[in-house]
Image (tube, coloured by chain):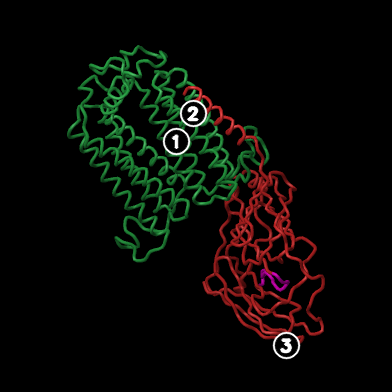
Amino acid sequence: MRRLQVGVMIVTLCASAAACGGASDDDANAASVPAAPLTNPVDPATAGNIVGRISFDGPLPQPAVVRMDSDPNCVQLGVTITDETLVVGSDGALQNVFVYVKDGLGDLRFPIPSTPFVLDQEGCRYVPHVVGVQVGQSVEILNSDPTLHNVHAIPSTNQEFNTGQPLPGMRHTHQFTTAEVMVPFKCDVHPWMYAYVGVVDHPFFAVTGADGSFRLEGLPPGTYTIEAWHETLGARTQTVTIGEQETGDIAFLFPA
Amino acid sequence: MLLHLFSLLVAASTALLIFAGGLVTSTGSGLSVPDWPSTYGWFMLTFPIDKWVGGIFYEHSHRLIASAVGFLIVVQAVWLWMAEPRHWVRRLGYIAVAAVTTQGILGGITVLWFLPAPISIAHASLAQLVFCLTVSIAVFTSPGWRRAYAARQAPLDTDRPLQTIAMLTTVFVYAQIVAGATMRHTGAGLAIPDFPLVFGSVVPPYWTWPIAIHYAHRIGALVVSACVLAAVGHVLYHHRDRPELRRPSLLLLGLLAIQITLGALTVLSGKQYLINSFHVVTGACVLGTSLVLTLRSCRPRFAASRTGATGSARLHESPRSYESTQEWSPTPGVPGARV
């Protein structure tokens, strides 16, 4: 009996030691990406555009200054960053809205950009805060800060991943395999750091800038459902029809 | 005596570990170190201290404290193996090693799998069992237990109602902690935002899973309170002159009051991380105290079963003993009974 007990202890200790000696590689980038055509199926002679503007209907929010005391390295950067949850211009222009064609493209398939999109961690925040990429396009997450970050993507349908970037200049490349609006990114080291990546299977998307405007170019004639997504105000859709070489103009108003 | 003091240290360290774990969850730092068992590629113990920033501070501290507690529990098991004559106490030491090892592996898995709720809940629930094991060992190695608390009263003064109430209290407290862990790891901590009412009423006007588990935790608090009050009332009425029962009873009552206050403040403060973490560790203290009361109330029964069933056989066990048999087993009429 005593031998058995000693044996159990030895096995347990060995298991502990083995558990402490491994290594983890959580690069969740092994999933296959569907093949895509090499040429754009839209005839440029007939292509049209959709332009518009996103506005916020409510009192102008005063973005709070983000306190970064929990990481002296961030404080020492000397950069003051503000909360990007709701950024509204003086004329009500709503920034950081992801606008994309939700429906209307049928079975059309589009080439995947060969250049990666760079999502930077700079000044202890994600830059840009809201981005769009195509399915299969490389997203390169870069650490430009003199501190550690962990890049934690929390998709619903794509593969979740969480990878550490302890040194400045480190890069992590990832390709999303399924369309998903939106994929939140966070840094668990710095809980104020968030980004949102819209993943769609076509190139017709945009993110509103300081003037709240957007432009979707090169669409074939047709009727489209356009969705505008905001991280706190939700999503709204509109339908627009464009003919050959026409430009449709729409506006979204997000109430407070 | 030294072994008992060391066991107390182990139990206190385990409580500290539970507090550190509470801080990890309360600050949302569970995934701030994405790898395990390494830390950003470093060996855990050599991870540079200047990199303990943001959420890493909580998660990495938790891992280091866990390693230290694991080491202490292994030392305790070895010590028990070398010096403890009661084989069932030695066995508890081995079980504690297995439990804390499993606990560490669960902690690693929950990080590598992005905090799946079932694993995280299991991690939180097993932590309480590890704590209970360390508390039990501390009780069993105490001088009071060995002399059967026999200084002031007959050692076989069995109080079955008290044993039942105390056992039920311990079981309900544990169930309540598991419900709390479920609430915590499914994001239901503020599913009911007001206190003491529920959306301005006594019963939720509508039900969702988060509301249901949150409400169950509140109802559980009432059940636990009733059990604690019954146990404490019973002890104070029937055993006021027995300090080994009176002291944990009064402590239990005080901890319950603190725990309910912390629970209310957790909701009202919007889950302020320190309040939330103290709520977690106070829950463990309520459980541990209830367990101490249970074990002490069962002490006479324990002796009877041990001496009656296996007493003669146990006399032929290996002669290792740190004290004379007469010192630690003075039960009248049962010389040498190892309990």
| Chain whose colour in the figure is red | A
Q: How dense is the environment of label 3, judged by Cα within 10 Å: few (below 14), some, or many (20 and up)? A: some
Residue B124: x and y in percent read 46, 43
SS class, disc 1:
helix
At label 1, the amino acid type is Val
Chain B painted colour: green
Q: Earlier in the sequence, mark 2 or mark 1?
A: 2
Tell me the residue that label 2 is attached to: B73
Q: Residue at x 72, y 72 (%)?
A: A202
**Circles 3 and 1 on the same subunit:** no
> Is disc 2 in contact with disc 1, using a CB cutoff of under 8 Å?
yes
Q: Is residue B17 left or right of residue A147?
A: left
Q: Nearer the viewer, residue A206 or B230?
A: B230
Residue B187 coordinates in the image, percent (x, y): 47, 55
Q: Is residue B168 magenta?
A: no
Nearest the eye: A66 or B264: B264
Q: Which residue is mark 1?
A: B130
Q: Which residue is mark 3?
A: A243
- Say above or below: A222 vs B331: below
Highlighted magenta segment, given as a residue range: A201-211
Q: What amino acid is labelled 2 in the image?
A: Ile
Chain ID for label 1? Answer: B
CA neighbours of label 2 inside 10 A, class few (<14), some (14 to 19), many (20+): many
Left or right: where B155 falls relative to A1: left
